Structures are given as structure tokens and as C-alpha cells.
Image (spheres, rainbow, N blue to C red):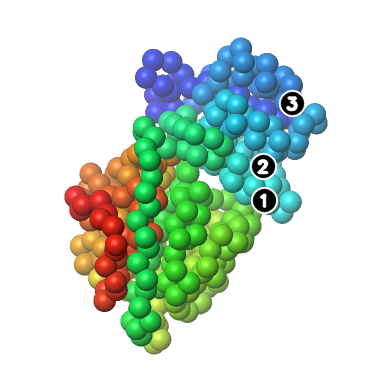
Amino acid sequence: MNAAFTGATRPVRVLIVDDSAVAREVLSAILRRDGFEVETAFGAQSAHVRIRNRRPDVVVLDLQMPEVDGLEFLEDVMQSIRLPVVVCSSIAQPGAKAAIRALELGAVDVISKPTGGLRAMVDTDRRDLSSVVAAAATARFAGGAGHRISGPTRAVTRPIVPRIESSAWSGETIVIGASTGGTEALREILSEMPENSPPVVIAQHMPAAFTGAFAKRLNAHSAMDVHEAKDGELLVPGIAVVAPGGKHIELEAAGRGPRVRVVEGPTVSGHRPSVDVLFHSAARVLGRRAIGVLLTGIGRDGANGLFDLRESGAHTITQSERSCVVFGMPAAAIQLGASCQVADIEDIPAAIVAALPHRAAPTMPLHPRN
């Protein structure tokens, strides 16, 4: 049994809800090999019975269900029980759109359904699936659907996001990394950023099939122009670009400001896109003109890169434990001394704008630096 994927006193209990017998067999084999305790359900009715009787730690849910629409089932679970749910979806485009909607309803993460023969599925997909499910098992919930925090609730008074003056842009760029729980954290940040914000570059751990739909979803909530990054794209104020899944994103110097490079390559820190790749490139190209933000997620990706950014003179911000779904990535950065400032997610937009050079000061106090 792999201790990394078990609870303190017992294995993590997982309920797989999928109408495909093959998918149930494959996902069960992957998770059992890593020490999870697994049950399966064909559809919504049997899933509800198992949830009532066994109270699993995590539900792995296919959105195509024979009795009740998967999104309807998810919404019911989030409103009545609030269990961590990982959506395991087809990579087809309609499935991608549904998966993004699932994130809005409160799913912790989305993963692509394994493809290929049984043996290939078990060998290829075991690590990612187990890591995501283990991370989901640590997520805590409060409030209604879609509201996830890791500590006690409190009354939230948002700081007013300072106005950005219309002075000439001098290349400042905001780089953000996120993983499990980051989809909602990114929406919250971008929905508060001013229209004339310096460009934002995002590395979010997400399967390739979902990042285009995810960028469109962020765009619908933001005054900025949010889209999937294109290789060679020049960064200008008012745009935010999301790394395509399965590729790294990095910055390079260009005559009129930084340029985005979307590149192939092996995984770095276990991921592609890797937050470390983005942050290291920002440290090289921008130095003190960068603002680095590391959000919720499992593991250590981004911690070393954020340290590099701080060493280069950049202002660095990590999401607080209280507001993270999974505190792994920010915690690793804080332990390294990579974080200039720790902030709750609702405070981060104002913290970003306040850190820009020659900008208006925030009207309300932010969290102190570490």
C-alpha cells in the first residue's frame, strides 16, 4: 500500500460512478494499486445508496450517466452532502464544456478519462489519477456549492482593487500558477482585475482538452481578454493567456515587451505545463518587473520558481492556507522563503495591483509580508 495515498489511520475511500464497466474496472485497478479503498456505482441511484451507507472521502464521477445527468447529480451532491468530487470526463469537446461547468458547480478537479488498452491505462494514468484523488481527499468545504475553504469561515470584507493609472506600460507582467482548486481561484482573481491590467500569464494543471473551454469561461467573467496562449504572442496590457494543456509556457524577451513561448518538452516537477518553467523564465526575462502568484494545488510545482522570482527582485504572493482547497504548492513555497506576501484569495487582486510600480496605494490594509 502506498502511504502517500492513504489517510492517517485508514485508506482513502473512493466511490467511482461510471456507467462503463471497463472504465470502472480500469479506474478501480489504478486506485487499488495505490492503496485506495474503492467502491463503484453504475448510476445516480446506486451512487446515492453507497454515499449514504459508506460516506466516501472522494467521488470520481463520469458526467455521462444513464439515469440522471452527471451535472445534475454533481449539483445535488454539492448542495446536500458537499463531498469532494473529481470529474473523469471524455476528452470530446462537449465533454470539455461539461467539465468546465462541473468546476463551476464545485468539482475539485477534472481529469481525462484514460484511453487505450487496459494495461496501457493502468501503467500510463495511474500516477496522475492517484495524485488528483489524494489531493481531493484533503479538500475541505464550507458554505454552499462551489465554496471551498480549508479553515473556519469568516466575514469577508474585500479590499477595493486600486485603480491602475494610465501611465505608459513598461513591461510589468503577472505570472500565476495553480493546480487543484485553482480554476475557481483564477476566476475570482481575474473577475476583479482592471481592464487595463498588465498582462497575465497562467500555468494551470489541466488536461489539454479542457484548457480552451476553461479560458473561454474565464473570459466570460473578466474585463480582461482571456484566451488560450499562442506561441510567439506578444504580451500587452489587458490580456490574460492560459497555457494549453500538455505544453509548457514560458516568457522570452522581445523588442516591444515580453513574448509568450508555448513549447513541447518533458514534464517538469511532474507537470506539463509546469509552473516552475513559467516562473523561472519570468525571473530571467523580467526580474523585478514580474509579480508571481502561486495558488492552491498539490505538490511542489512552482515553489522553486517562485523562489527564483523573489531572488530576482519580483514581488511574490502565495494563497493562504485558509482559502486554499489544497495548500501543498503555496506551503512548499512559503517553507522555501519564496513568498513576500500571503493573502486570502479574495485579497489577491488588490495585492497584485498594489505591488505594481507607480500605482495607487490600496485603500484597505492587506496581509503583512512574511
Mark 3: which amino acid? Answer: Gly
Q: Residues within 10 Å of mark 1 (few under 14, many from 20)?
A: many
Tell me if label 2 and label 1 are in contact, CB under 8 Å: yes
Q: Residue under label 1, please give it.
A: 96
Considering depth in this image, is 227 or 129 the residue closer to the camera? 227
Q: Residue under label 3, please give it.
A: 43
Q: Which mark is residue 89?
A: 2
Q: Residue at x 47, y 43 (%)?
A: 180
Q: Is residue 92 left or right of residue 2?
A: right
Query: Which residue is farthest top?
Result: 53
Q: Is residue 262 left or right of residue 26?
A: left
Secondary structure at badge 1 equals helix
- N-terminal of the pair, mark 3 or mark 1, is 3
Q: Residue at x 67, y 50 (%)?
A: 96
CA gap, disc 3 and disc 2: 15 Å
The quarter in which the N terminus is drawn is: top left
Considering depth in this image, is 4 or 151 the residue closer to the camera? 151
Q: How far across and down, in percent of the image, does residue 120 sit?
A: 63, 38
